[in-house]
Amino acid sequence: MAARQTGKIRTLADLGLTARQGGAASITGLTVDNRTVTPGSLFAALPGTRVHGARFVGQALEAGAAAILTDAEGVQILNATAAEAMMRSGAALIVAEDARQTLAYAAALWFGAQPEVMAAVTGTNGKTSVATFTRQIWSILGHDAVNVGTTGVEGAWHAPLSHTTPEPITLHRLLAEAARAGVSHAAMEASSHGLAQRRLDGVQLTAAAFTNFTQDHLDYHASFDEYFDAKAGLFRRLLPPEGVAVINLDGHRGADMAQVAVDKGAKILGVGRTGRAQLRILAQRFEPDGQVLRFGWDGRQHQVHLPLIGGFQAENVLVAAGLAIACGDAPGDVFGTLSGLETVHGRMQLVARRETGAGVYVDFAHTPDAVSTALRAMRPHVMGRLVVVLGAGGDRDATKRPLMGQAAAEHADLVIVTDDNPRSEDPAAIRQAVLLGCPDGLEVGDRAEAILRGVDALGPGDALLIAGKGHETGQIIGASTYPFDDAEQASVAVAALDGRLA
Ligand SMILES: CC(=O)N[C@H]1[C@@H](OP(=O)(O)OP(=O)(O)OC[C@H]2O[C@@H](n3ccc(=O)[nH]c3=O)[C@H](O)[C@@H]2O)O[C@H](CO)[C@@H](O)[C@@H]1O[C@H](C)C(=O)N[C@@H](C)C(=O)N[C@H](CCC(=O)O)C(=O)O
Ligand SMILES: Nc1ncnc2c1ncn2[C@@H]1O[C@H](COP(=O)(O)OP(=O)(O)OP(=O)(O)O)[C@@H](O)[C@H]1O
Ligand SMILES: N[C@H](CCC[C@H](N)C(=O)O)C(=O)O
Ligand SMILES: [Mg+2]
């Protein structure tokens, strides 16, 4: 989270900052954590969920901070705890109404480059899918493109990430590195946490997209309205008035989000089944390994085979196509790429097949709506029964647990409840909360065993959906992360049960 580059020095004015005192400071780096302050750093003392960063100004000054950026609450804390140290140090003090946003702008200026064309996507579900499809479309069209989000930076340039939307210092460092490596196009996920915390406010967007809005993260946002408002910030604050808003109009808040973008003066490109959509889904036919999609654009019909499982992926694909069009590619060229799209890592991904032909799929559904959507979306591809293995994460929205169980019971023929990152919580208590929604569910705490039992339950024509972990490669228990990969466990289970293990 610290930004330092040997030899790089900036004035406050270079970073767009005006100081209340000590305005002549030279800055050698940016950081939000006093433990990474080095001589000359600007320490952004930000309001946090656990503590205000201003509590650490004393330590930051001792480590040589040349400037402190904070907000009004931070000034009060600073006056009470480090006023004298501040006077003695001569460090600059920058007070901003919204210190997180000011840091985001300063980080953009510090790193000084981003891919020329950038799009961001928000929504409860589908962000990773849309960002990945957008990057795939761009890549097929010959652009050097990346997607940035839950699965890291993927495409023409790679990097791991610990957040879906990285905090601004990490974000602008990687955008600048990607731009300097020749990346011209980037599609990024805008999580509600990221938007609420202004993590991407320094990014220059050409287009922004909205997928859908259902329950998640009510541990962090005080209400549904606050959660919606956080997402609306993408269109209200970030999208420039000359930008294009690509909106899935089908969901119950799609029209509201379109209105936010209209109020901003942005152009709308609507997607969906509704007659108001410019990119309109007209028909879908489901096959065991994919689907045929017919859609309309500008008075003409197009038909394409998508090697993707799940009707909702067609919505995500068209939102991605909308973004590519909004960012300047010709619609005909964009539509020509769609049959070449590939499954998104860990999203409705076929990972193993039993000898009988029964398929095992891994998906990242970890909200009530996503569990319901994923299972309903599997149905038309499956002849027989549908089995689901799922759990719910610890230290996350607890109210979604029984609702996830209920969604599983409603849409699967057999439910196996297991663990999914219990973190600091009691795994058995989380399972019980999920089972409240699916009392007939089978409880198998160990996830590998749950997968084995799920695979064992498959007859010819059946399918198993392993929900919740998608691309993840670990099981977080307490403070430790143990290696765990649903896809790998599925292959092991199939091999063991079909006698293909050495
Ligand atoms: C709830 C949340 O989002 N917290 C994020 C937030 O932390 P915070 O500001 O609340 O941290 P805090 O501990 O209160 O500290 C306040 C300030 O004091 C500073 N500090 C703190 C201690 C110290 O000794 N010295 C010091 O300087 C901290 O650096 C911080 O700036 O800002 C930090 C730095 O930007 C983030 O790393 C941290 O993400 C935590 C780890 C997290 O788990 N976030 C998840 C929930 C998240 O953001 N998820 C979304 C995806 C969600 C989804 O769509 O599913 C994401 O975009 O990844
Ligand atoms: N358009 C959609 N409508 C409803 N559900 C969807 C849609 N797209 C994806 N999903 C479901 O949500 C899960 C997560 O998809 P994806 O990773 O693309 O979403 P995300 O918004 O990036 O999630 P996160 O907030 O965790 O980053 C998928 O595995 C699928 O079950
Ligand atoms: N970005 C989501 C991912 C949840 C994935 C699921 N496996 C869990 O741990 O709940 C979150 O942090 O809430
Ligand atoms: Mg994501």
Image (cartoon, rainbow, N blue to C red):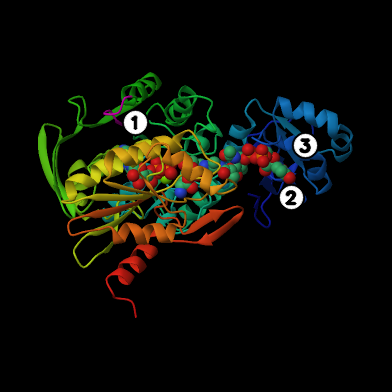
SS for dot 3: helix
Look at the image and tell me in which quarter the C terminus lies.
bottom left
Residue matched to label 2: 35
Residue matched to label 1: 245
The verdict on label 2 being within 8 Å of ligand 1 is: yes
- Label 2 and label 3: CA atoms lie apart by 12 Å
Amino acid type at mark 2: Arg
Image quarter of residue 121 = top left
Amino acid type at mark 3: Arg
| Of the pair 374 and 31, the residue shown nearer to us | 374
Which callout, 2 or 3, points at the residue further toward the start of the chain?
2
- Label 2 and label 1: CA atoms lie apart by 40 Å
Residue 42 locus on image (x, y percent): 71, 43
Which callout, 2 or 1, points at the residue further toward the start of the chain?
2
* Stretch of the chain drawn in magenta: 243-252
SS for dot 2: helix
